[in-house]
Image (tube, rainbow, N blue to C red):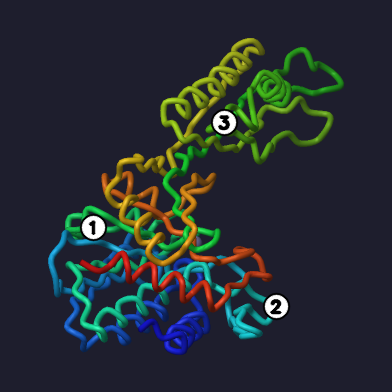
Amino acid sequence: MIDPHRLTSVFLDLVRIDSPSLGEKGVADHLKARLSGRGYDIRIDDANLSTGGDTGNVIVRVPATGPGDPMAFSAHMDCVPPCLGVTPVLDNGILRSSGNTVLGGDDKAGISAILEALFHLEEERIPHPDLYLLFTVCEEAGMFGAKGLDFSRILAREVVVLDACGDVGTIIVRAPAKAGLKVAFHGRAAHAGIEPEKGISAIQMAAAAISRMRLLRIDEETVANLGRIEGGGPTNIVPDSATLTGEARSQSETTLMNQIGHMRGCCMDAAREFGGSCDFSFDISYPAMHVPQESALLGRALHACERLGLVAAVKGTGGGSDANIFSGHGLSCINLGIGMSRVHTTDEFIRVADLIKTARLTAELMQS
Ligand SMILES: [Zn+2]
């Protein structure tokens, strides 16, 4: 049986351990200790060589006790600030922090549910295929743990990520690709009072470029935003530099590239017209996630919800997660809503009832 008491106590233990991005070692060690001596293969990889953090990802292989293809279950160990010294409070079936920090249910609720589901299967001797548990680092900072994961060692082709908001039964099947971009306009400085005609204003260039850009909501699946504009100096100097920092996201990678091409074109045209120059750079922060309707994993998740009496809601989201990275590596992947609420704020909370539902759903998906 899913044991609410054990589940809650695993959760409380986890949220009491500090684990900011790059500082997840306490949680990694705790999980290693908790899972050792049970016949699992537990490894901590060297993702920290690229992240610079104090630990790598925790990868646990639980040997099969029944038939079926290997499956992976994943949740991240890090939390967003303020997350040091979390003092959880259990009040009327609701878990929250004492108010000065986040709770860290994002994503320790996911970790707790995975552990409880596994303990439950073992106690009841319910057969399951080979299971991989992927507890990642640095998700919140840009999915750097998942990006550094050695996928050749994970034989599962299907990954269930437990890291979405929404009621239990929410199944995220679409998430956009995201590109970060930076533009530097170069003009020519001149005294603004004496000979401004000898100058080229980088600020004017940037303004002209921005005024022609399609921004914010581009279409149903595409958005773009400039988040920061910097440049210039004293008012008596024609400014010779200005920079823009922005991002674009789309469910369609083609549309994303078109949007970036459009933004780049506006910048280049403006630079040329003013006689200056422009450096435009971008990088893809993460690829899109798109689970086809006929996905076997999605089908199993829908059945599991039905068996448990959960209302399934198949949805897209505007944000990225480790699920995007796993999808980008060709794994079939869904991201489950686990009932965590007001995440990334000090008002974050989760209901014990949702922890239990998530553990039940996870156990259902784990079994052969
Ligand atoms: Zn999360």
Q: CA distance from mark 1 to mark 2?
A: 38 Å
Question: What residue sits right under mark 2 in the picture?
Answer: 99
Secondary structure under the numbered disc 1 in the rendered image = loop
| Residue appearing at x 46%, y 71% in the figure | 357
Task: Return the disc, 1 or 3, that comes first in the chain's sequence.
Answer: 1
Where is the N terminus found, in terms of image quarters? bottom left
Q: CA distance from mark 1 to mark 3?
A: 35 Å
Picture quadrant where residue 133 is located? bottom left
Question: What residue sits right under mark 3 in the picture?
Answer: 220
Image side of residue 275 versus residue 192, left or right: left
Between marks 2 and 3 in the image, the one whose residue lies nearer the viewer: 3
Residues 265 and 58: in front is 58
- The numbered mark at residue 150 is 1
**Vertical arrangement, residue 46 with respect to residue 87, above or below:** above
**Vertical arrangement, residue 146 with respect to residue 192, above or below:** below
Task: Return the disc, 1 or 2, that comes first in the chain's sequence.
Answer: 2
Tell me the kind of residue under disc 1: Asp
- Say whether mark 1 is within 8 Å of ligand 1: no
Secondary structure under the numbered disc 2 in the rendered image = loop
How dense is the environment of label 1, judged by Cα within 10 Å: few (below 14), some, or many (20 and up)? few
Tell me the kind of residue under disc 3: Glu
